[in-house]
Amino acid sequence: MPWVRFDDQFTIHRKVDGLTDAAFRLHVAAVFWSARNLMDGFVPEEDLDLVCARLRSPARFAAECVSRGAWHEARTPCPGEKCPAPVDNPGWVIHDYWEYQPARAKVLADREAKARAGQKGGLASGQSRRLRAM
């Protein structure tokens, strides 16, 4: 499971500070949802209701996130290098998602490396126990 990181200035950034409480909740929930589902900041339109289940009319607040610059339409190219490439599906991308969140490829590579290290350590531990038992 990847961790989610926020800058200590997150809540006072102009894109975030200007959000209504409901849009703020959706934005933060979307960061967590995207990390948990390894979506690289992409929120598909069809999954918007899953991002923040307690929020009624999430599309309204997604539009607010877009108008404040916290999100952009998924099909819209973004010049920012910390923003995922456009996605040819209806939905949104969390702007500059990669500034603080790791990319899906990095999370998967880290998981694989940890699994290999754990397997290697387990084998070494087993060999050590066998040698001590002799």
Image (tube, rainbow, N blue to C red):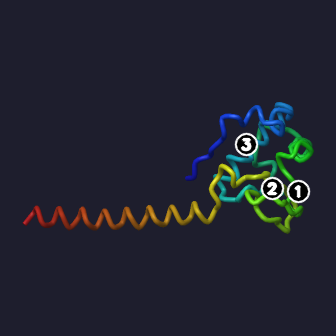
Instruction: Return the mark for residue 43.
Output: none
Find the residue positioned furthest to the left: 134
Quarter assignment of residue 67: top right
Helix, strand or loop under label 1: strand
Q: How many marks?
A: 3
- Residue 86's spot in the image, x, y percent? 83, 65
- Residue 49's spot in the image, x, y percent? 81, 48
Precedes in sequence: disc 3 or disc 1: 3
- Residue 123's spot in the image, x, y percent? 28, 67
Helix, strand or loop under label 2: strand
Residue at the disc numbered 2: 93
Q: Is residue 69 above or below residue 13?
A: below
* Callouts 2 and 1 close, C-beta under 8 Å: yes
Q: Is residue 96 above or below residue 113?
A: above
Residue at the disc numbered 1: 73
Type of amino acid under label 3 = Ala
Type of amino acid under label 2 = Val
- Tell me if mark 2 has few (under 14), some (14-19) or many (20+) residues whose alpha carbon lies within 10 angstroms of its own: many
Quarter assignment of residue 90: bottom right
- Tell me if mark 1 has few (under 14), some (14-19) or many (20+) residues whose alpha carbon lies within 10 angstroms of its own: many
Precedes in sequence: disc 2 or disc 1: 1
Q: CA distance from mark 2 to mark 1?
A: 6 Å
- Residue 102's spot in the image, x, y percent? 62, 56
Q: CA distance from mark 3 to mark 1?
A: 17 Å
Residue at the disc numbered 3: 29
Give left or right: position of 117 versus 88.
left
